[in-house]
Image (cartoon, rainbow, N blue to C red):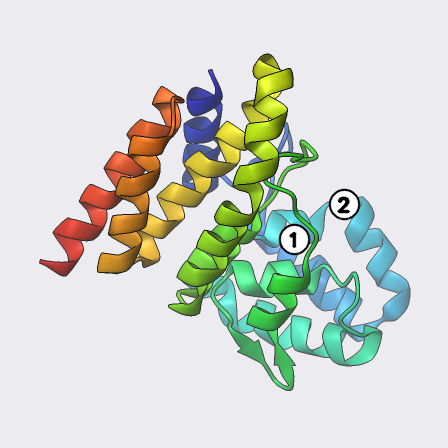
Amino acid sequence: MARTFALALVMTLAASRAWAGLDCDPETAVKDVEAAAKDKAKAAEAERNYSFLCSEGLPAKWKPRIGKACEKLLDRDGEKNNPCVVVAASVGFVTLGKHDLFELVGKLPEDPIEYDGGVGFRKADLYAAMGDPRGVAAIEDMWKAAIPRAEAREKKHRQSMADWSSWRQGAALNLGKLGDADAKAFLEEQAKATVDTHVRDACTDAAAAIAKRIT
């Protein structure tokens, strides 16, 4: 079930930009973000309209407008808790003006075994969207750091590990997009180590995607 959910989420991202029942219109969403950049009083309205969320991961044709608006928002409102960190990274910006989005994404709070159930791009998704090779190590470090806690919890609460399973499936998918031979070896290692068949399949598929790309 966890794998089905994860794959359905990926398909939703790729296809319709609908989040949790929202019917997102890209033009309306980007206009709201632009309005927020021009007038701080409009930022709350953009939040209420889910316009930042609906702007996440939009196709390349929207990138220049999002970049221009988000740079203004980051300059004016600061980087902390600014939705434009996620929005700009999700459309492929690694830096935006003076703002290092790769570094800022790394500071976003996220626990692979305590996923909050929200919608939108996770950190591994953002690293893949930015296309920065440093994202491979960042994803692997999050994965490795969570293993001891996940194993300890699984011994006590075997049925409560759906978040950990879902996170690893998504992380594997994104490593498959970004990774090199070392990432392929990491995925193969994780495929052998896990008893979760969905994670094993995701790791195997991602390793195969890397092999196809680098050979």
> On the rendered structure, is 46 left or right of 4?
right
**Residue 45 in sight:** yes
- Say if 212 sits above or below 119 in the image: below
Q: What residue type is labelled 2?
A: Asn
Q: Residue 107 carries which label?
A: none
Q: Which residue lies furthest to the bottom in this view?
A: 98
In the displayed orientation, state which residue is furthest to the left.
Answer: 215
Which of 81/187 is in front?
Answer: 187
Is residue 168 left or right of 79 when viewed as pictured?
left
Q: Mark 2 points at which residue?
A: 49
- The amino acid sitting under disc 1 is Ala
Q: Where residue 99 sits in the image (x, y, percent)?
A: 64, 80
**Secondary structure type for disc 2:** loop
User: Are the two marked residues, 1 and 2, in contact with CB atoms closer than 8 angstroms?
Assistant: yes
Q: Quadrant of the rendered structure where residue 21 is?
A: top right
Residue plotted at (46% across, 37% down): 168
- Closer to the camera, 183 or 21? 183
Assess disc 2: are there few (<14), some (14-19) or many (≥20) residues with their C-alpha within 10 Å of its C-alpha.
some
The one of 102 and 39 positioned closer to us in this rendering? 102
Q: Which mark is residue 29?
A: 1
Residues at marks 1 and 2, CA–CA distance in whole angstroms: 8 Å
| Residue 119 relative to residue 194: left or right | right
Q: Considering depth in this image, is 35 or 136 the residue closer to the camera? A: 136
Query: What residue is rendered at 57% in x and 15% in y?
Result: 158
The residue sitting at 22% across, 58% down in the picture is 181
Q: In this view, does 203 lie above or below 87?
A: above
Q: Please count the marks in the image.
A: 2
For disc 1, the neighbor class at 10 Å (few under 14, some 14 to 19, many from 20) is: many
